[in-house]
Image: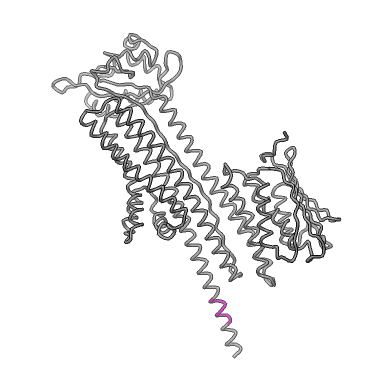
Amino acid sequence: MSKFKGNSYIYVIVGIFLTFGILLIAINHYSDKAITGIRGFVSGESHWAKAQKSAVLELIRYINLEEEQYYENFLNSLEVIHGDKQARITIMSDDPDYDLAYEGFLQGKNHPYEIDSMIWVFRNFQNISYLQEAISYWEAGDSIIEELEQTGQKIHQLIINNEITEAEKEFYIRTLYETDKELSNLVDRFSEEITEAGIYLNSFINRSILITGLTLIFIGALITLTAFRLVQKYHHQRNEAQFKFKNILENSRDVIYLMNKYGTKYEYMSTSVENMLGYSVNEIIMGGPNFILEKIHPDDKKRIEEERSKFSTSDLEKQLEHDTEFRVKTKTGHYIWVNNKRSLLKDEDGKPVGIIGNVRDISAEMEYVDQINQSLKEKETLLIEIHHRVKNNLAIISGLIELQKEGINGHANVSEVLEEIQSRIQSIVLVHEKLYQSETLSEISLKSYIEDLTNYIDGVLNNGKKTIQIDKKLDDVKLNIIHAVPFGILYNELIVNIYKHAFKENTKQCMAKVELQAQNGTISLVVADNGVGLPEGINPKKPETLGLTLIKSLSEQLNGTLELCDEDWTKFRFTFNLPDAKLPSLD
C-alpha cells in the first residue's frame, strides 16, 4: 500500500510538473506571438509611412512633369495602404475573414511570418486602450488617404484634359505638403500608441509568468522583457517643371539642348545654361559634349563615358529611355547635381535626326535625399542597439534566476525567495521604464531611479511591524543603460538587506541613509543603517550569500570599489568612475 501511495505522489508531482511546464510553454508561445505581432505592426507602420510619402512624392512629380508613369506610381504606392486597410476592416467586422485579412497585410508588405501574430494580437487585444487609440489614428490616416486619392483623380483628370494651370499646380503641391505633414503626425501618434501597447503586453506577460512561478517554484520562471521602438520616416521632395519644347526654349530655368543623333555635337543650347553653370552658350557649343564631360565629377565620369560608348543609332531610342544624373562643376568651381532627360527627335518620315535634352539642377533634392538616408541609417542603428540591450538584460535575468535556484532547495519561505527574485527583476524593469520616460533611449536619471526603486521595495517588504525612515540625499546624475542595469541590481541588494536583516521589530527607531554624490567624474553611493549590524565573520570580499556575491560581482563589473564600515552605523560605500556619466552642473 505504501508503495502504491509513493507511486501516486510521483505521478502527482510529474503531472503538476507537466501541467505547469505546458502552461509555461503556452505562456512563452503566446508571449512570442504577442511580441511578434507588435513588432509586425511597428514594421507595418514603417511600410505604411513609406508608401504614403511615396504616393505624395509621385503625385507631386506627376503635377510637375505631367508624365503618366508618375500617376501610376502614385496608385501603386497606395496599394500598400489599401492592403492594410482591407485587413483592418475585415478583422473588425462581425464575421471576419482571416484569409482576406492575411492577404491584406501581405499586400501591405508585412512579413508573412509576422502576419498571423498581427491578426492574433488585433483580434484578442483590440479593446485595450492603446490599440484602440492606435486604430483610431489608423482610421484617420485612411480617411485622409481617401481624400488624397480623390485629389489625385482630380489632378489626373485636369492633366489628361490639358486643363491644369500653374496656379492650380502650386495649390495642389501646397495641399499635398500639408497632407503629408498631417499624415506624418498621425503616423507618429500611431507609433507611440503601438509602443505603449507593446509595453502593456510585456507587463501582462510578465505578471502571468510570475503567478505561474509562484504556484510551482521548481520549474523556475521565464520572464520576457522586450522593448522596441522603430521610428522610420521618409520624406522626399522634388520640384521640377517641364513644358512643351516650343514654349520654354528660352524662358525655362532648365537647360534645353539639341545635339546630332551621334551625340558628338551640340546644335542648340538654351541661354539658361549661363545661369546654371556660368559658362556661355558659345563656350559649350564650341567645346561640344567633351567640354561638359571634362567638368563631370570624377566619381560619375566613368559611368557617363561608358554610357556614351554604347550609343548606337540602330538602338538609340531605347538607350535614351532612362534619365541620367551626375555632378558637374560650374564656372565658380563647385559641383551641382543635374538630371539629364533625353528623347529622340525624328523627322516626318520617322527617321532620327537628333537628340533633344532637358537638364535640370537637382542639388537641393539630392542633398535632402542624403539627409533622409542618413536619418534612416541612424534609426536602424538605434533599433539594433535596442535589441542588443534587451538581449543582454534577458541574459542578466536568466543568470539571476539560475543563481537563486542554487539556494532554493530546502528554503522554508518560498514567498521570501520569490520576493528577492521579483525585486531584482524589478530593478531592471525600472531601468527600461525610465528610458521610455526620458528624452533619449540611452540614459536614465539615477536620482529618480533610486526614489522609485526604494518606494517599490518598501511597498513589497514593509510588513507593518516596523517603520524604516530613509533619509535620501541624491545628486542628479544620468547614467547610460549599459551601466544602469548592474548599478540598479547592486542598489537593490543593499536596500533589500536593510529591510530584511538590519532591524528587529520595534526595538528602536529604524533609520537608514542613502547618498548619491558626483564630483570630478567620480560617482559615490552610500547606503547605511543604524540597525543590528552585520553578523560576525561577514566579509564582502569573500561573500558566502547570494546577495553579497551579487554586490561583489556587480561592483567589479562596474570597475568600482566597495568599502564596509560597521560601527555605530553599518555603512556600504560604493565608488566608481565613468567618463560617459552625465554629472550635475557645479554652477
The location of residue 535, given as percent across then percent down, is: 82, 63
SS majority, magenta: helix
Membership of 10 in magenta stretch: yes
Answer left or right for 266 relative to 458: left
The location of residue 460, given as percent across then percent down, is: 66, 62
The location of residue 465, given as percent across then percent down, is: 74, 66
Q: How is the image coloured?
A: one colour
Quadrant the N terminus occupies: bottom right
Foreground: 566 or 555? Answer: 566
- Kindly identify the residue that appears in the image at 48 percent across and 45 percent down: 230
- Work out which residue is located at the far bottom of the displayed protein and give it: 1
- The range drawn in magenta is 9-15
Quadrant the C terminus occupies: top right
The location of residue 280, given as percent across then percent down, is: 36, 10
- Kindly identify the residue that appears in the image at 25 percent across and 29 percent down: 318
Answer left or right for 322 relative to 418: left
Q: Quadrant of residue 184?
A: top left
Membership of 187 in magenta stretch: no
Q: Quadrant of residue 351?
A: top left
- Work out which residue is located at the far left of the displayed protein and give it: 349
Foreground: 546 or 185? Answer: 185
For residue 308, above or below residue 574: above
- Kindly identify the residue that appears in the image at 34 percent across and 15 percent down: 272
